[in-house]
Amino acid sequence: MAFRSQFLGCGGYLPERIITNAELAQTIDTSDEWIVQRTGISERHVAAPGELTSDLATAAARRALTAAKVDASEIDMIILATATPDNTFPATAARVQHNLGITRGAAFDVQAVCTGFIYALATADNFIKAGQVKTALVIGAETFSRILDWKDRGTCVLFGDGAGAAVLRAVPSNGSTSERGTLSTHLHTDGSNYDILYADGGISTGKSGFVRMEGKEVFKHAVTRLAEVVDEALTANGLHASDIDWLVPHQANRRIIDSMGKKLGLPKEKVVLTIDRHANTSAASVPLALAEAAGDGRIQPGQLVLLEAMGAGLTWGAALVRW
Ligand code: ACO
């Protein structure tokens, strides 16, 4: 029998502490006006001292399990996307698994920076399609505040901390695009642009490193690559932009999101936006936006949802989901 993965429920978690643009402008040479105009960001959440990526991930996962009405004991696989793990090893997913009281199945991390959630979703979806997993927990969680150079105004204003999670379940499928579940996922990497967005350190280099980015270059690639992968996803399913009910994009820059919405001919109210309040939470941004729009009833069963993201690597990807 063929299967596809259906979203049963989503959850998000944001740390309590909020840093506004005005607060940042007290310590670096920036302004609320510059940040809002260039990025659409007004404020971001930042983890408390001692609050780790696994803590945010666990909180989001609990909310997703509640929304899905699934008990933790039913989870066969946890895939956690993060570029900011608690420790070098074991996987942060193992800590989350323990926090949830699960002792069976598999738990591991994937690393594709801002595209991480799409990578984790694609991995879970393929395990489900292969019939190896019935119920999966997919999480994107980050504490980017810990790898920001708070003196570099070109990067520190852009990011925030948070986590989002989704519970997926195998459902029988006859392959129709009108049937509920994940229709397809599309992943890409091109390492030739590694140096335009990276952390200048890691375990192997012997220092922890901070985010470094050539913003304008990343921006150009984002607009092109996202347009390509969205076309790829629609073509793979014989669908058209006009079929999309909701665009749930990675929240890196309001101008990138607006250009995607425009390309797809979507009215603004069909594009889920959290960037103003969350900033760029890397792997957490897509599931946080999904949790908001599914949680408040905007996304309804049967609607077509397009997820897309681009991040360091460069990595980029998309998923089409019949909700
Ligand atoms: N406040 C005030 N001025 C600033 C700030 C700031 N926070 N940051 C930069 N500036 C200045 C620059 O120094 C520069 O000044 P200069 O002209 O005197 O040299 C000027 O503003 C313009 O800087 P640019 O970098 O050219 O500004 P740009 O319009 O490109 O906006 C931004 C920068 C917001 C970073 C944009 O390029 C962007 O969003 N890029 C894409 C980021 C992205 O998509 N990331 C995705 C993945 S993230 C991940 O994977 C981890």
Image: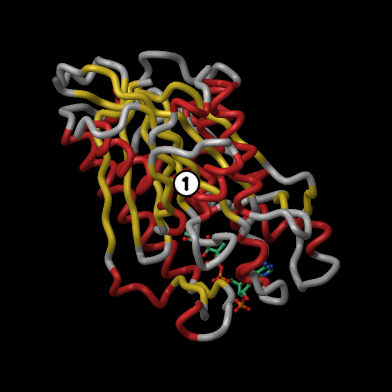
Q: Which residue is at the front of the view, 90 or 79?
A: 90
Is 145 drawn above or below residue 20 in the view shown? Answer: below
Residue 107 in view of the camera = yes
Quadrant where the N terminus is found in the figure: top left
- Name the quadrant where ligand 1 sits: bottom right
Is 49 drawn above or below residue 2 in the view shown? Answer: below
* Residue behind mark 1: 250
Taking the image as shown, residue 319 lies to the left or right of residue 25, namely left
Q: Residues within 10 Å of mark 1 (few under 14, many from 20)?
A: many
Is 62 drawn above or below residue 163 in the view shown? Answer: above
| Residue drawn at (53%, 54%) of the image | 92
Taking the image as shown, residue 41 lies to the left or right of residue 258, namely right
| Residue drawn at (16%, 35%) of the image | 236
| Residue drawn at (45%, 41%) of the image | 249
Is 240 drawn above or below residue 22 in the view shown? Answer: above
Secondary structure of the residue carrying numbered label 1? loop
Taking the image as shown, residue 243 lies to the left or right of residue 259, namely left
Q: Amino acid at mark 1?
A: His
Direction front: furthest residue: 103
Residue 40 in view of the camera = no
Expressed as whole percent of the image width and height from the top left, the position of residue 54 reads 60, 50
Check mark 1 vs ligand 1: CB closer than 8 Å? yes or no: yes
Expressed as whole percent of the image width and height from the top left, the position of residue 160 reads 65, 54
The image's colour scheme reads secondary structure
Expressed as whole percent of the image width and height from the top left, the position of residue 158 reads 62, 60
Quadrant where the C terminus is found in the figure: top left
Expressed as whole percent of the image width and height from the top left, the position of residue 238 reads 15, 28
Residue 52: image quadrant is bottom right
